[in-house]
Amino acid sequence: MDINFQTDKLVIIKYPTLAGGKFLSLCLAIHPDILHQDQWMAKTKMQKDFDQKKSLEMSKIPFSKKLKDGNTHYEFGCWQLAGFGATALTVDIKADEKTANELWTELTNQNRYHFCMVEHTDEAIAWTRYPNRKTIILRNFEWIMEKRNKKCSEVWYNNLKEENYKNRINFDMSLLQNDKAFLQEIEQVFDFLGLDKVEDLYLLELRNSFLETLTIGFNIGEKL
């Protein structure tokens, strides 16, 4: 079986490094039809058909690990899920064909589960061979990066041309600071993906965990 580049289940979350995009992927993965960025978890979820409650437990793992350690950032990611990431595709557009694991090929050939990957560059380079991908572009995330001792480059915003993404939606990260606004914003993302929204209480629980652990691993003197 070959990679199906025509898949419409690939969701790209586009944002500069440290802007909080992995949090959004964890929120989305509460839905039974969206997978976590971890190969074992993705396989297990598909095999056991996890509901929202079980999916939430999986989404909470990175925050639990950060709280337990106290000074190390932890997250799921593209390489953990697929065996490659956008950085590899930027260097070699066919890197997926060379290094992707079997799960990636399986995911591109199935029609139930959405699966997330990221893109940190300001250009539409990495995922151009997947024309039916859906892209979520993060906005107003500077406050998160500042709390993590990093500033957003103006180049990222100035070079970002949304017209290069035919199937896209923006997500306003500033709305995480308000319960109602956050829930309304993420509901639009689920609508964009053609899925029902998950339980509000689950989303707010995950949001609170994100805000509680926002700076862990990014303060001076902490290890990464």
Image (cartoon, rainbow, N blue to C red):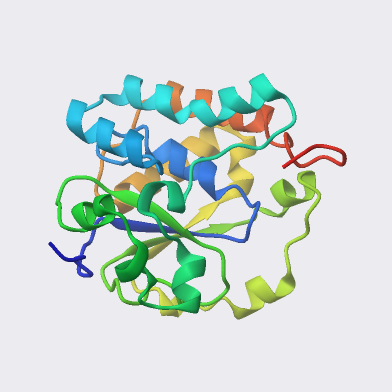
The answer to which quarter of the image holds residue 57 is top left
In the image, residue 116 lies at what x, y percent? Answer: 38, 51
In the image, residue 70 lies at what x, y percent? Answer: 73, 25
From this view, report whether residue 138 is shown above or below residue 49.
below
From this view, report whether residue 143 is shown above or below residue 136.
above
Residue 58: tell me if it is visible: yes
Residue projecting furthest to the right: 221
| Number of numbered discs on residues | 0
| Residue at the spot 36% in from the left edge and 63% down from the top edge | 99
| Residue at the spot 20% in from the left edge and 69% down from the top edge | 6
From this view, report whether residue 105 is shown above or below residue 198.
below
Along the viewing direction, whichever of 126 and 51 lies nearer the viewer: 126
Name the quadrant of the N terminus.
Answer: bottom left
Residue 200: tell me if it is visible: no
Along the viewing direction, whichever of 46 and 124 lies nearer the viewer: 46
Name the quadrant of the C terminus.
Answer: top right
In the image, residue 194 lies at what x, y percent? Answer: 24, 49
In the image, residue 44 lies at what x, y percent? Answer: 27, 31
Would you say 105 lies left or right of 93 here? left
| Residue at the spot 70% in from the left edge and 46% down from the top edge | 144
The answer to which quarter of the image holds residue 147 is top right
Would you say 146 lies left or right of 190 here? right
Along the viewing direction, whichever of 75 and 31 lies nearer the viewer: 75
Would you say 98 lies left or right of 65 here? left
Residue projecting furthest to the front: 98
| Residue at the spot 76% in from the left edge and 42% down from the top edge | 218
